Amino acid sequence: MTFFDAHRAHFMSATRRLIKPLLDRVLVEKITPPTKSLGGVLLPESMTAGKLNEGMVVACGPGRRTMTGELVPLDVKDGDTVVLPEFGGTAINVGDKEMFVYREEELIGVVPK
């Protein structure tokens, strides 16, 4: 396990203790695009502009209920990278981070790993 994986696991468990979404809601932290390349070269703003449309799922609700009361589980899970709509979601502060709550139907898709 790398340092990044350990940090992410610790952050996700700490966040999960703070808030648990209800029903088909998903708590997402937007992914900030890098401002430097791996070699240390500063990237121009034109390469990073408008790239806040991806986020990491931090916590999920159990799913939605049908008219007959059956539970339909979510298609996303903790740790998934998802594509977000340009507008929407409810901004909340969790600790010192700004996160967003979406209904699963608002999410555009899941980025394959």
Image (cartoon, helix red, strand yellow):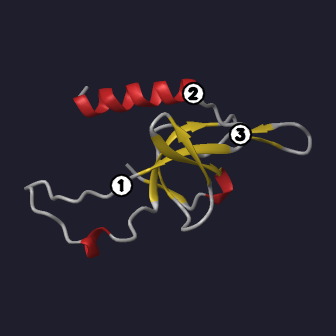
Residue 106, position in %: x, y? 64, 59
Name the image quarter holding residue 49.
bottom left
Q: CA distance from mark 1 to mark 2?
A: 22 Å
- Give the residue type that dot 2 points to: Leu
For the residue carrying disc 2, how many other residues have a C-alpha within 10 Å: few (<14), some (14-19), or many (20+)? few
Residue found 67% across the figure and 56% down from its top: 105
Mark 1 lies on residue: 32
In this view, 69 is above or below 32? above
Residue 94, position in %: x, y? 52, 37
Name the image quarter holding residue 26.
top right
Name the image quarter holding residue 107.
bottom right
For the residue carrying disc 3, how many other residues have a C-alpha within 10 Å: few (<14), some (14-19), or many (20+)? many
Mark 2 lies on residue: 18
- Give the residue type that dot 1 points to: Thr
| Label of residue 107 in the image | none
Residue found 51% across the figure and 37% down from its top: 78
Mark 3 lies on residue: 63
- Give the residue type that dot 3 points to: Gly
Residue 42, position in %: x, y? 14, 63
Q: CA distance from mark 3 to mark 1?
A: 28 Å
Residue 83, position in %: x, y? 49, 59
Residue found 27% across the figure and 76% down from its top: 46
Label 1: which secondary element:
loop
Query: Taking 21 as reference, is 64 left or right?
Result: right
Q: Nearer the viewer, mark 3 or mark 2?
A: 2
Is the residue under label 1 in contact with that under label 3 (CB below 8 Å)? no
